[in-house]
């Protein structure tokens, strides 16, 4: 199936596209709200400005995908591969990214209010300026992540690993941090 056929079938009411192979697909600005893309291969795809609100992308391959300004609110991305994905200013509010791999992903200025990133791997990710109030990051790997200027107020970072993370000017007010591994020399105020 190619992009044109996908969009035609979606417009006709079809929503289930499990396991679809669309690497490098150009889906800029596409409206695919509620689509079922479980285990889909969108490696390197361009989804800049796309709307996938309420979609299922569990275990999807989005490695290196471009998701700038994408609407991914309330999306299921559990177990998804988002390594090196570009998610700058993306809306991931209330999304489920539990167990997702976001190594070296760019989430600069992304919105992740009330999202679940439990057991997610964010090693080396850029989360500078991210809005993450109330985010759940229980047992998340944030080693060497850049969280400078991020809002982590009221977040749950229990048992998360923040070794080497940049927490310069990070708002951690009322953040729950039982068992959290903090960077050397970090003092929580």
Image: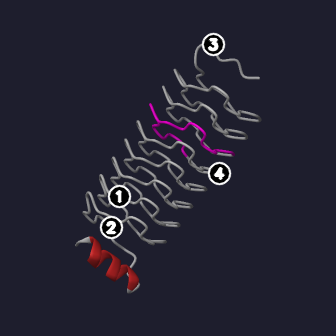
Tag 1 and tag 4, C-beta contact below 8 Å:
no
Closer to us: mark 1 or mark 2? 1
Q: Earlier in the sequence, mark 1 or mark 2?
A: 2
Query: Which residue is at 58% across, 14% downward?
Result: 184
| Quarter of the image where one finds residue 56 | bottom left
Which of the numbered marks, if any, corresponds to residue 114? 4
Label the magenta part by its dominant secondary structure: loop
**Would you place residue 83 above or below residue 40 in this image?**
above
Closer to us: mark 1 or mark 3? 1
Query: Which residue is at 43% across, 54% downward?
Result: 67
Q: CA distance from mark 2 to mark 4?
A: 27 Å
Q: Which residue is mark 3?
A: 185
Q: Which residue is mark 1?
A: 46
Q: Earlier in the sequence, mark 2 or mark 4?
A: 2
Q: Earlier in the sequence, mark 3 or mark 4?
A: 4
Q: CA distance from mark 1 to mark 3?
A: 40 Å
Viewer-proximal residue among 106 and 36: 106
Query: Which residue is at 60% across, 56% downward?
Result: 94
Q: Which quarter of the figure is the N terminus placed in?
A: bottom left
Which of the numbered marks, if any, corresponds to residue 18? 2
Tag 3 and tag 4, C-beta contact below 8 Å:
no
Highlighted magenta segment, given as a residue range: 117-133
SS for dot 2: loop
Viewer-proximal residue among 25 and 14: 25
SS for dot 3: loop
């Amino acid at each position: 199936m190619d992009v044109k056929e996908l969009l035609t079938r979606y417009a006709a009411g079809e929503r289930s596209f499990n396991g679809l192979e669309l690497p490098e697909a150009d889906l800029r600005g596409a409206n695919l709200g509620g689509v079922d893309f479980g285990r889909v291969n969108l490696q390197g795809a361009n989804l800049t400005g796309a709307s996938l609100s309420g979609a299922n992308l569990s275990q999807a391959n989005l490695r290196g995908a471009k998701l700038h300004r994408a609407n991914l609110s309330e999306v299921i991305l559990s177990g998804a591969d988002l390594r090196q994905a570009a998610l700058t200013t993306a809306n991931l509010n209330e999304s489920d990214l539990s167990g997702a791999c976001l190594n070296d992903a760019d989430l600069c200025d992304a919105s992740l209010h009330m999202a679940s990133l439990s057991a997610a791997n964010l090693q080396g990710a850029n989360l500078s300026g991210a809005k993450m109030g109330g985010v759940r990051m229980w047992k998340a790997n944030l080693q060497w992540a850049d969280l400078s200027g991020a809002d982590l107020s009221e977040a749950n970072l229990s048992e998360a690993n923040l070794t080497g993370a940049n927490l310069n000017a990070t708002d951690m007010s009322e953040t729950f941090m039982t068992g959290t591994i903090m960077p050397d020399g970090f003092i929580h105020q």
